[in-house]
Amino acid sequence: MNNEAPQERYYLLRIAHEQYGCAPEQLSAAQCGAAARIAARQRQIEAAVLYSPQALGVVIPEAQLDDAWARLVARYADADALHAALAAQGLDAAGMRERLGRELKVEAVLERVCADLPALSDTDVSLYYFSHPEQFEQPAARVARHILITVNPDFPENRREAARSRIELIARRLQASPERFAEQALKHSECPTALQDGLLGTVRPGTLYPELEACLFGLAVGQIGPVVESPLGFHLLRCEAIQEARRLTLDEVLPRLRDSLQNRQRKARQRQWLAGLLQPSVSGETLHG
């Protein structure tokens, strides 16, 4: 029983950071309840895996544990911050390393369970590709640059009318010399992309505010649109290139698709194995008439 309390605090610490991005004491009552349920399930799975026949002989190298510890420390400002966070939960470095070792052993056992899975052949991957063509459709896209003048009533030069006047002046300048768009973005844009000469990169549908997207996708290559207003302020957009909608080829997706399908196969094997591991044996059940 004495060993359960540190385990419980460890699980809550990890779940709070991974699921909610905060310390356990910052969780709401509802979040605390959800974290407790997740922790209970994870403890059940961990115990079943570590006491399974497949766990026999699995040893985690000290160097691997050191790497895991270093990754944990990297989440905090420094080692002192980590130790303070652990102490707040009644944990210490030795206990945390022991918990990390158990996690690594669980991962190693799950990998062992999948060790006999055959590698997917090119035929297997091709069959999936041609059976699911809709998954490889790439929507039309635009490569774009933009200039933003923000609206902020706290600054006279960024009050709405002043901001509009400023961007309209830039627009007139670009009407005479459209090739100066990158230069004008670097000088005047109030968006972080100004450092890249206003380059937004490849823009796909659903990426920008609707009013900006409607403008951009109506432009020809090299064309600069009219001034457009968004909740951020006023924009000028230039279409640098058009990428038409197309289906990615098998050669383009083959390595990534193989990895994805292989990982899916591994996860399915692990789920099946865990389900069998966690299923109570009939002989251990009490039957009631």
Image (spheres, rainbow, N blue to C red):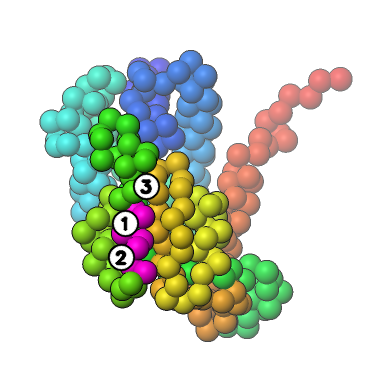
Residue 145 image position (x, y, % from top left): 37, 65
**Looking at the rendering, which quadrant does residue 134 occupy?**
bottom right
Question: Number of labelled discs?
Answer: 3
> On the picture, is 183 further left or further right than 128?
left
Using a 10 Å C-alpha cutoff, classify the residue at mark 1 as few (fewer than 14 neighbours), some (14 to 19) or many (20 or more).
few
Q: Which mark is residue 169?
A: 1
Q: Secondary structure at mark 2?
A: helix
Q: Main secondary structure of the magenta part?
A: helix
The amino acid type of the residue labelled 3 equals Arg
The amino acid type of the residue labelled 2 equals Arg
Mark nearer the N terminus (3 vs 2): 3
> On the picture, is 241 further left or further right than 188?
right
The answer to whether residue 174 is magenta is yes
Camera sees residue 124: no
Q: Residue at x 71, y 74 (%)?
A: 131
**Looking at the rendering, which quadrant does residue 278 occupy?**
top right
Task: Please state the extent of the stretch shown in magenta in the rendering.
Answer: 167-175
Answer whether labels 3 and 2 touch (C-beta < 8 Å).
no
Q: Which residue is mark 3?
A: 164
- 274, 174: nearer the viewer: 174
Q: Which mark is residue 173?
A: 2
Residue 102 image position (x, y, % from top left): 36, 41
